[in-house]
Image (cartoon, grey):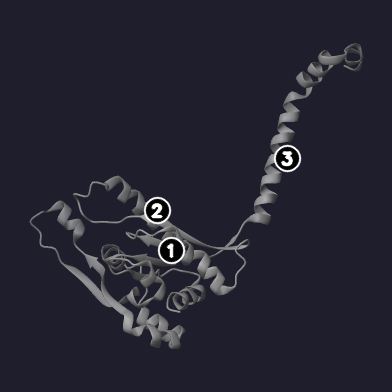
Amino acid sequence: MNTCLNDLHGKKKIQYIWDYYKLPAIICLIFLYIISYTVYGHFTRKETLLYTALVNVSASEPFTDELSYGFLDFLDADSSKKELRLYTGLYLTDNPDDPNREYTYASRIKTVASIDDEKLDVVLMNKEAFDAFSQNGYLYNLDKLLAEEVPALHQQLAPYFVTNTEILEDNSEELLLDSSAVYHAETAEYPMGLDLSASPLIQKAGFQETVYLGIIKNSPRMHTVFDYLEYLFV
């Protein structure tokens, strides 16, 4: 090889080297890219302090900034290292005639997946979405939770508790097989939502309908959730 390489000059020499080392060079470049990307991601990845979602609620960009960056300012957190993840554009409905059924299905899948992955802590929603989250048993009993964990916050927010119904068990599967069957269900009622009408931040946003807040039962970031409640009612 050395003899051949010494006999070549200019472009032919470069072409010979490229042809001979092309595959090892490509492999090395790919390997270096993967290492660089991994190292860059490690040093630039932000810590997510809280996962929140707007469901069946449309909001302006300034309002969503207040829900996220405003909360980071409230905590005096460095936004270059920490973040609040806010899911927007989620839409849930049980209306069988809804024209956006595919979009609704995609929203439902994303919501359930986020809950299963423990990447959803707080939900801001309208009444229809509040009913859906309540019936499926996704929401904490706020009266019990706040009374046990943050009594002072419980006293402040108790006037805004909203009771809803969780379906513990029903015969919906039976109805699919027998349309003549009568629907019946075992349910539980408890305060699982907050009416946010008294929140200064929500008032400033000017929503035409009531916005409710619910806390997801499997949230592993409960202390940050309590901070978020304080922020909304400052």
Residue 231 at x, y = what percent? 47, 75
- Side of 223 where 215 appears, left or right: left
User: Looking at the picture, does residue 123 appear above or below residue 106?
Assistant: below
Q: Give the side of residue 122 with respect to residue 1, left or right.
A: left
Q: Are marks 1 and 3 in contact (CB under 8 Å)?
A: no
* Real-space Cα separation, disc 3 to disc 2, in angstroms: 34 Å
Q: Nearer the viewer, mark 1 or mark 3?
A: 1
Q: Badge 1 is on which residue?
A: 63
Location of the N terminus by quadrant is: top right
**Image position of 63 (left or right of 195):** right
Sequence-wise, the earlier of marks 1 and 2 is: 1
Q: Nearer the viewer, residue 98 or 202?
A: 202
Query: Which quadrant would residue 214 be assigned to in this image?
Result: bottom left
Q: Relative to the observer, which residue lies in front, 119 or 174?
A: 119
SS under mark 1? helix
Kindly identify the amino acid type of the residue bearing the numbered disc 2: Lys
Among the two numbered marks 3 and 2 on one chain, the one whose residue lies closer to the N terminus? 3
Label 3 amino acid? Leu
Q: Is residue 194 visible?
A: no
Q: Residues within 10 Å of mark 2 (few under 14, many from 20)?
A: some
What residue is shown with label 3? 32
User: Badge 2 is on which residue?
Assistant: 110
- Residue at the (30%, 66%) spot, across then down: 130
**For marks 1 and 3 on the same chain, the one whose residue lies earlier in the sequence:** 3
Tell me if I can see residue 30 in this picture: yes
Mark 1 and mark 3: Cα distance apart in space: 42 Å
Disc 2, SS: helix
Quadrant housing residue 2: top right
Q: Are marks 1 and 2 in contact (CB under 8 Å)?
A: no
